[in-house]
Image (tube, helix red, strand yellow):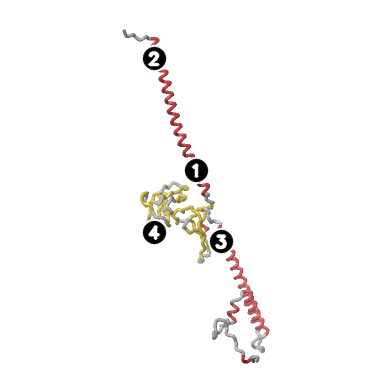
Amino acid sequence: MPVPASAKTALPPPGGAGKKVKEKSGMSKILDQTREEQMKVFEKIFLAQVQHPQDPLNPPSNESLTQNIMMFHSSAQQSRMNELLEQINTNHIKAQGIAAKSYLNKEVEYQGNEFSYEGGEENIAFLMPDNIKEAKLAIVDPTGAGVTSIPISVEPGAKIFKWDGSIHGRPEIKVPQGQYKAAVIAHTKDDNKVEVPLTFKGVVRKVGYHDASSEFALLVRNTPIEMSDVATVSKPASPELISMTEGVQEQIKRYNELSGYLKNRLDQKVEANQLKESVEKAKQVLEQVEEMIPLPTVS
């Protein structure tokens, strides 16, 4: 026997019986749509208000209608402007990302004060200006505690200071590996204080992105720097080339040592030959003297 339509029970909504699905409001549905869809909805609402005014006996005036049209047009322009700005920002981020990735595994020179000490020798480059009376290089650890302070030459021109990690000029005491800051503090002959810009060198190991500044950063060893601080970019030598260069340098060293040894032996041989020639000449002179003056015989 067929069940009458009035007796049919509705199926429970998904998620279990007794639970009601809360439908979104009309405004929420509009906000979930794209800007283009939102503009179409607002356009329909505006046209409906114009065609069907709330008070037929008092339709909107031309001035009010013009204001509404201008407001609608301004809203559309603002929406379009926002879309263009978002697109420009997205393209800018993509271009920055491509540019940042191009630095990976390349050696860069960058201007700044922070650097990563990894236990070797750190080259700190700077350009000493003219009219400097005295200058010193100061290095501090991450806590700001002084590590070393060394007087440096005030002769103007490009300079490179090699720091081996020693504390206060004592090579037997080394700092641990980590982040450090350096500064060249100089005083002019007029007693004005000048901080000389520094340049460091290292290989870019990683690329990062800062949400707050919307900018990419390069990780040179363990030091984050901005792309605008990069002065030069070069591709570091491959391990094979470095090994080959070291082999050639070792062969040159051995060649120089062998050349020095052979030259020394040759000099010794020349001296021996000269001594032999001198002895032969002395014998000849003695024989000539004997011929000229016969030696007395012993009876």
**Which residue is disc 4 drawn over?**
144
Callout 1: helix, strand or loop?
helix
Disc 1 to disc 4, how far (Cα)?
42 Å
Query: What numbered label is drawn on residue 97?
Result: 3
Q: Quadrant of the N terminus?
A: bottom right
Residue 201 versus residue 283 in the image, above or below? below
Residue placed most toward the observer, 282 or 35: 282
Q: Is residue 59 above or below residue 163?
A: below
Q: Quadrant of the C terminus?
A: top left
Mark found first going from the N terminus, 4 or 2 = 4
Please provide percent x and percent y for residue 220: 49, 56
Residue that lies at the very extreme toward the left in this rendered image = 299
Nearer the camera: disc 2 or disc 3: 2
- The CA span between labels 4 and 3 is 33 Å
What is the number of callouts on the image?
Answer: 4
Q: In 3D space, how far apart are the residues under numbered discs 2 and 3 (Cα atoms)?
A: 94 Å
* Label 2 sits on residue: 286
Which of discs 4 and 3 lies nearer the camera? The answer is: 3
Name which residue type carries label 4: Gly
N-terminal-most mark, 1 or 4: 4
Dot label at residue 211:
none
Above-or-below relation of 291 to 99: above
Looking at marks 2 and 1 on the same chain, the residue that comes earlier in the sequence is marked by 1
Dot 4 falls on a residue whose secondary structure is: loop
Which residue: 46% across, 35% down?
A: 258
Label 3 Cα crowd, 10 Å radius (few <14 / some 14-19 / many 20+): some
Closer to the observer: label 2 or label 1? 1
Q: Closer to the camera: disc 4 or disc 2?
A: 2
Q: From this viewpoint, which residue is outermost toward the front? A: 1
Q: Indicate which label's residue lies in the foreground, 1 or 3.
A: 1
